[in-house]
Image (cartoon, helix red, strand yellow):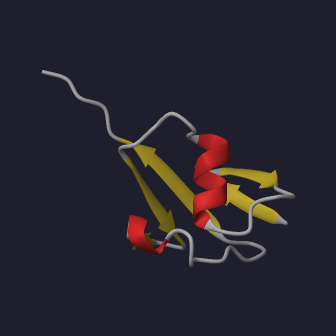
Amino acid sequence: MKLTINGQTKNISNAATVADLAAQFCPNRKSIIAEINGAIVPCGQWDKTILKEGDAVELVAFVGGG
């Protein structure tokens, strides 16, 4: 399936849900936010949100600083 992930087009074969994709691209990040086609997906919905061909996905990690 072809997705645009953080602005780059990628062919992804084994990511059916937002949770699957986040596990592949941000395995050690707990403070990330997912946006699909301009809409933020609450983390409680990641397992239920099915990705579709052509979706634009943004995975954004929060980092602390001071």
Figure quadrant of residue 65: top left
- Near-viewer residue (44 or 37): 44
Where residue 2 appears, as percent x and y from the top left, is 82, 63
Q: Determine whether, in the image, residue 43 is placed left or right of residue 21.
A: left
Q: Is residue 30 above or below residue 12?
A: above
Residue 46 location (% of width, % of height): 51, 68
The residue lying at 51 percent from left, 33 percent from top is: 28
Q: State which quarter of the image contains the N terminus.
A: bottom right
Q: Pick out the residue farthest to the top.
A: 66
Q: Is residue 8 left or right of residue 22?
A: right
Q: Position of residue 47 (x, y in %)?
A: 56, 70
Quarter of the image where one finds residue 51: bottom right
Q: Position of residue 40 (x, y in %)?
A: 40, 70
Residue 14 visible in the shown view? yes
Q: Residue at x 33, y 39 (%)?
A: 62
**In the rendered view, does 25 fall on the left or right side of 45?**
right
Residue positioned 66% across, 58% down in the render: 20
Residue 38 vertical placement versus 6 (above, below): below
Residue at the farthest left position: 66
